[in-house]
Amino acid sequence: MKNNYFFLLLGSTFLLSFFSKILLNTDDLITNSLSEQFTIEQINAVINFREKWQWVAYFFLPVLLLLKIIIIASIIDVGCFFFLKRNQIQKTIQHSR
């Protein structure tokens, strides 16, 4: 069941990144922002380079998402561990009185 949540989160992340690329029209934004500093050929080279290596972002997206989930889960687990230790010590002190 937990595996399904990861794939659901991963799918929604892919969809959001895909639709944000379409809705924001990033190629036009890049062209407009770089048009004052570079020539059209240089801007086209930047856009072609970005499109060529775009698959890398889609490859690393699940890896980074999984890493983020693992780090957050580890921090919560360590916090629960220390919280339970503190409660056990307080219960031991209360019982010894």
Image: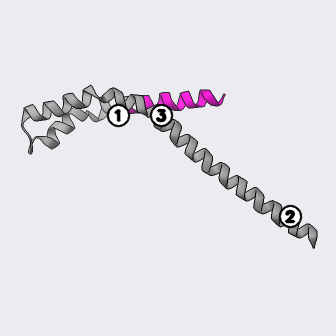
x 79%, y 61%: residue = 87
SS label for mark 1: helix
x 61%, y 45%: residue = 73
- Give the percent coordinates (x, y) of residue 86: 76, 62
x 35%, y 34%: residue = 20
Disc 2 designates what residue?
91
Q: Nearer the viewer, mark 2 or mark 1?
A: 2
Disc 3 designates what residue?
63
Nearer-the-camera pick, 17 or 59: 59
Indicate which disc, 3 or 2, sits on the residue closer to the N terminus. 3
Q: Is residue 10 left or right of residue 38?
A: right
Q: Nearer the viewer, mark 3 or mark 1?
A: 3
Q: How many marks?
A: 3
The amino acid at mark 2 is Lys
- Give the percent coordinates (x, y) of residue 41: 8, 31
The chosen color scheme is one colour
Query: Looking at the magenta stretch, what is its main secondary structure?
Result: helix
What segment carries the magenta color? 1-17
Indicate which disc, 2 or 1, sits on the residue closer to the N terminus. 1
